[in-house]
C-alpha cells in the first residue's frame, strides 16, 4: 500500500478507495518520512472535527513513531496539537468549521483526511495556500467537490480511484489485515452498493434515493414525455 501511494508524483495526490485499504495510515507514514528528511517545513493534517483527528490521524502518528521507537513526549505539544521533529519540521493537526480559520500561514504539505466531509470553500482555500503537495483521501460513497471542481480541471493531479490514472485502493492492497478483518469485509458482498464503495473502492450512490443510475444531460430528449407539473414532476 505504502509503495503504491509513493508512485504518485503530482502536486495534488488524490487517494480514493474502500474500507480497510490503509489509505490514511499509509499517507501518515509518508508524512513522517517527509518530516524526518526535510528541514524547516510545515505539514498540516486537516479533518472536519477534532474528535475525528484524535481517533484517526493523530493516533496513527503516535503509533507510527512509537513502532519505530521515535516518539518523544517532549516534541509533542498537546495544546497546539503539534509534533516538532528534530529537523524543525512541524506536523500540525487542525479542524476547520468555518472559512475564516483557513486564512492562516501557508504550508508546505497538506493532508485533507476524509476530504468529502469538508466543504469546497474551505478545501479550496487550504489547497491554494499549500506550496508543495496536497494529499486527499476518502471513501467514494457519493459525488462531492473533487469530481466537480478538481477532476478534469486540475492538470497537476494524480488520482487513485475510479476514472483516475491509478486504480482505486481496496482491502486487498492491505497486507496487514487479519483473516478476521478480511472475513468481516467480505461478508458484505450481498449488499451491492456497500460492496461497490467499501469493497471495490468504486463510486457509489446515496442510499435512499428514489431514482438510481441517473445522469445529468444537456437537454431534454425530443421523445421525452411530461409526467406531472408543479412541485412533483418528472420525465420518462
Image (cartoon, rainbow, N blue to C red):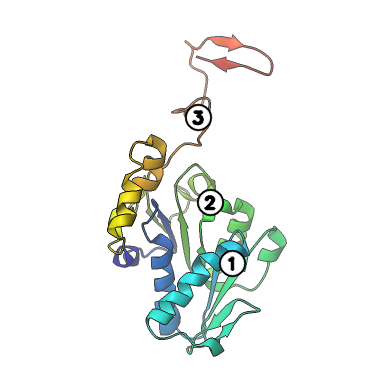
Image check: 164 left or right of 39?
left
The residue under the point 47% across, 59% down is 136
Residue contact between numbered discs 2 and 3, judged by CB atoms under 8 Å: no
In the rendered image, residue 11, in percent from the top left (x then y), is placed at 44, 64
How crowded pointer 2 is (Cα within 10 Å; few <14, some 14-19, many 20+) is rated as many
Residue labelled with disc 2: 116
Q: Which mark is residue 194?
A: none
Label 1 SS: loop
Residue 12 lies, with reference to residue 76, above or below; the image says above
Residue 199 lies, with reference to residue 212, above or below; the image says below
Residue labelled with disc 3: 216
The residue under the point 50% across, 14% down is 236
Q: Which one is closest to the eye, mark 2 or mark 3? A: 2
Separation of marks 3 and 1 at Cα, in angstroms: 33 Å
Separation of marks 2 and 3 at Cα, in angstroms: 21 Å
Image check: 1 left or right of 41?
left
Residue 72 lies, with reference to residue 94, above or below; the image says below
Label 2 SS: helix
The residue under the point 60% across, 58% down is 48
**Quarter of image, res 52:** bottom right
Q: Nearer the viewer, residue 52 or 27?
A: 52
Q: Which mark is residue 129?
A: 1
Amino acid at each position: 500500500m505504502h509503495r503504491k501511494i509513493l508512485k504518485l508524483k503530482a502536486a495534488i495526490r488524490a487517494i480514493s478507495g474502500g474500507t480497510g485499504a490503509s489509505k490514511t495510515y499509509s499517507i501518515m507514514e509518508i508524512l513522517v518520512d517527509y518530516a524526518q528528511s526535510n528541514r524547516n517545513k510545515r505539514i498540516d493534517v486537516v479533518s472536519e472535527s477534532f474528535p475525528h483527528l484524535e481517533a484517526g490521524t493523530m493516533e496513527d502518528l503516535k503509533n507510527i513513531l512509537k513502532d519505530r521507537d521515535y516518539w518523544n513526549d517532549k516534541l509533542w505539544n498537546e495544546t497546539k496539537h503539534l509534533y516538532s521533529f528534530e529537523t524543525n519540521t512541524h506536523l500540525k493537526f487542525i479542524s476547520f468549521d468555518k472559512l475564516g480559520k483557513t486564512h492562516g500561514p501557508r504550508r508546505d504539505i497538506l493532508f485533507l483526511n476524509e476530504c468529502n466531509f469538508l466543504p469546497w470553500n474551505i478545501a479550496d482555500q487550504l489547497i491554494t495556500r499549500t506550496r508543495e503537495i496536497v494529499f486527499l483521501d476518502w471513501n467514494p460513497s457519493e459525488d462531492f467537490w473533487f469530481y466537480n471542481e478538481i477532476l478534469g480541471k486540475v492538470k497537476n493531479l494524480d488520482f487513485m480511484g475510479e476514472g483516475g490514472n491509478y486504480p482505486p485502493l481496496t482491502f486487498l492492497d492491505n497486507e496487514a489485515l487479519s483473516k478476521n478483518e478480511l472475513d468481516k469485509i467480505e461478508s458484505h458482498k450481498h449488499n451491492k452498493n456497500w460492496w461497490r464503495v467499501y469493497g471495490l473502492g468504486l463510486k457509489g450512490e446515496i442510499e435512499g434515493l428514489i431514482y438510481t443510475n441517473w445522469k445529468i444531460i444537456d437537454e431534454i430528449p425530443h421523445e421525452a414525455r411530461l409526467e406531472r407539473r408543479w412541485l412533483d414532476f418528472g420525465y420518462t
